[in-house]
Amino acid sequence: MKTHAQVVVIGGGVVGCSVLYHLTKRGCKDAVLLERSELTAGSTWHAAGGMHTLNSDPTVARLQKYTIELYQEIEAISGQSCGVHLTGGLMLADNAERLEYLKILQGKARVMGNDCEIVSMADAQAMHPLFDPQYFIGALFDPLEGHVDPSGVTNAYAKAARIQGAEIYRHTKVEALTQTADGGWEISTDKGIIKAEKVVNAAGLWAREVGRMVGLELPVLAMEHHYLVTEAVDAIVQREQELPHALDFAGEIYTRQEQQGFLLGTYEKNAVPWSPKSTPWDFGHELLQPDFDRIGERLDTAFKHFPFLAEAGIKQTINGPFTFAPDGNPLVGPVAGLQNFYVACAVMAGFSQGGGVGLALANWIIDGDPGMDVFAMDVARFGAFATPKYTNLRAREFYGQRFSIPYPNEVRPAGRPLRRTPVYDRLRARNAVFGTSYGLEHALYFAPSGEPAIEQLSFKRSNAFPAVATECQAVRSGVGLLEISNFAKYEISGPGAAAYLDRLLANRLPKTGRLTLSPMLKPDGKLIGDLTVACAHPEQFYIFGSGVYEGVHRRWFEQHLPQHPDQGSVQVRSLVSEWTGFAIAGPRARELLSRLVWDDVSNEAFPFLGFRSMFVGMAPCQVGRISFTGELGYEIWTTADFQLTLYDALLDAGEALGLCHFGGYALNSLRLEKNFGGWLREFTPDFSPFEVGLGRFVNFNKTDFIGREAALKAREHGGEKALIALVVDVSDNDAVTNEAVFHAGKVVGWVTSGGYGHTVGKSIALACVDKAVAAAQDFHIELLGEQRPAQRIEAPLYDPSGRKMRS
């Protein structure tokens, strides 16, 4: 065995072998894979091998498409067949709501160029005559769906990686991991020690155990999963063409042809974790005992929907474990606080996602960046809140809801409430309906008194619509109060803080007592952050940003800390749990604040983008004059122990002013009326600031900041995309995100954010479109399978000059 390698990958399943292959493809030949047993020995060998492109996250969907298209490449290099069966697949809808969902999926697929089609029952039956059409009303056909041979795929990756220079050591168990003084790793195995510059935990069922070797508790849980394979079926034997896959939402089953038999799998509601505390090291090519009582209801439905099954003999029953993260997406990327340590685990759809995971992680290891927006897979999307109990509850919920309709306004209940601010119970008493951000509860809207604080799930306007309208009108006409504790907060301090931030941020730093809006760029000139920066003191800055991106930004800040003492001392501190806050906004916001402070808060004394320490009532606070609503507004921050005191003071002083609580839904409506973009919607790592309207915040008078040279080039050519605002002709449903945008009959982009502007009376969508058509006026947006007219608008519908926010 080698004693040194540039990268060591731990785990020989499909994901580990894909990572190894992609490292060699990127030119990293000095890569080694360690497998405690045989390749495929964890979950890979017993997988059903299904593959598809459709996914609710567009990046994950693109990577799934990449994975499927990759199989031809690795077959050619390795000479190993992947056993690809590209049969296409039908998603069967049994009711109108599920058919609406399929129409939404079809629209999202169009954005990627996938030729999915809603088909009638007659057409679906012609493709797949073995189901009973009386139980269904429509279907979506996806031509890029099928299955592969799990062993063939894994070995194709492995052989291709070996051909391109990598080495694989089977029957080599990793027993310990130790960080070395130079930032590398010493990997102790039962065959000796190998040193590596970088380590990848792709250990699958054992990812938790490998993580624990370095003090990391990964949010991963293995679940038992059943599927059955029948004996040969006459109706299949007699067919010349292989059956397409068929996914039955009502039955909560997936099906496909397996040789001349039929394969049927289910995600039952009463999901059962396997080995929830630790995975036995001696578990290998083994299966679990089937539990027919647990899946009996699903089988009864399957026998009705696929009547031939009642006469088919069962050849094989598979019950095997495979891993899930709390939200069902993979965990990929570098781990904050652990130098040169990466993960690629919880990939429950390995034969749809394994290639994309390998590509993204290899890019990350070699370039320091995955090359695309992979937040949906980034391990940093979970923080310390993702405890083992939380992971258990959430993963079980996800598994049991695998075939349930994911509504755009759905916030699932498992593991909640988890993180709560002191004001949570007070807001709940006011009938708040809550969502979550990085595990923290925050109000979405306030249901009317006497009504249940429950939002009805819908693809159209929900019962929240009138309540949100009331909140928006209150902000525009008087003053509203919003808890903003779910924003991310950081303190950057020390003698070197200014130089450190000047290097990190693309805009100039604010002067003491001021705020600045600043993009943060990657070396390729694309966005990694859209931040508000406050200067409290020349050596003390506060940064505010997206709450869900807390872990990603914290990792970025840590990775770019000065490495040499002469660069100055810098401390980066997350305030995520320490600081809480409220925003007040509306034409009477200044009047409210003035009743609680001694300071002069007139426009002259405390202008737009001012930042100041104040006593608000009895609470010591940091106050910034800024608002995401487009109104006069302030963000008021205090420590958690003062939050209730601050809240009571705001309520008391605001009562005579008609103070109204508002939530995240109203904030979204108000910011759309102003064409304000948001992080991970309009502003993502896929774009330069010049493509999404942030170019004015990039200050090229600064001679050195990360991404400057690439940003200069981006400014010159302007990029391929542009952000536009549209008014959409709708009736009772609005665009949300990722809907296809058409111009002249062709897909030219997608909706980044959408909703109803309650105070302008228009349905609004922000959209990313091809730059070549960005100046056009007439567009269409596909909503529930229907193309609705959309007109581009040049300026925000509300206060286009921005006077109200600044006066």
Image (tube, rainbow, N blue to C red):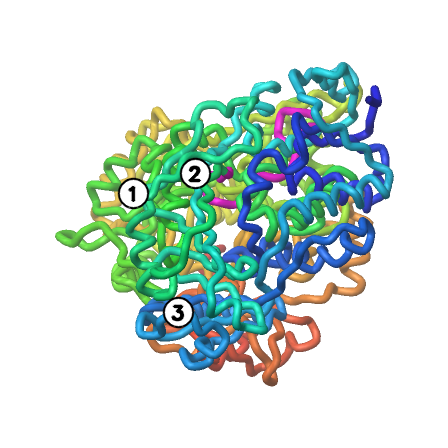
Question: How many angstroms separate mark 3 from mark 2 (CA)?
Answer: 27 Å
Looking at this view, is 562 or 729 the one in front?
A: 729
Q: What secondary structure is the magenta-colored segment mainly?
A: loop
Tell me the number on the disc at residue 293. Answer: 1
Relative image position of residue 693 (x, y in whole percent): 63, 61
Q: Which residues are magenta?
A: 322-341
Whether residue 353 can be seen here = yes
Q: CA distance from mark 1 to mark 3?
A: 24 Å
| Residue under label 3 | 131
Q: Using the image, tell me which numbered label, if any, was put on residue 69.
A: none
**Residues under labels 1 and 2: Cα distance?**
14 Å
The tag earlier along the polypeptide, 1 or 3, is 3
Question: Observer-nearest residue: 692 or 30?
Answer: 30
Is the N terminus in the top left, top right, bottom left or bottom right quadrant? top right
* Residue under the image location 61 percent in, 66 percent down: 112
Decide: is 9 above or below 514.
above
Tags 1 and 2 in contact by the CB under 8 Å rule?
A: no
Q: Secondary structure at mark 2?
A: strand
Q: Residue at x 74, y 31 (%)?
A: 33
Q: Residues within 10 Å of mark 3 (few under 14, many from 20)?
A: many
- Closer to the chain start, of discs 3 and 2, is 3
Does residue 601 lie above or below 180 as drawn? below
Type of the residue with mark 1: Asp
**Which mark, by number, is residue 224?**
2
Residue 568 position by quadrant = top right
Give the x, y percent position of residue 754: 46, 65
Q: Nearer the viewer, mark 3 or mark 2?
A: 3
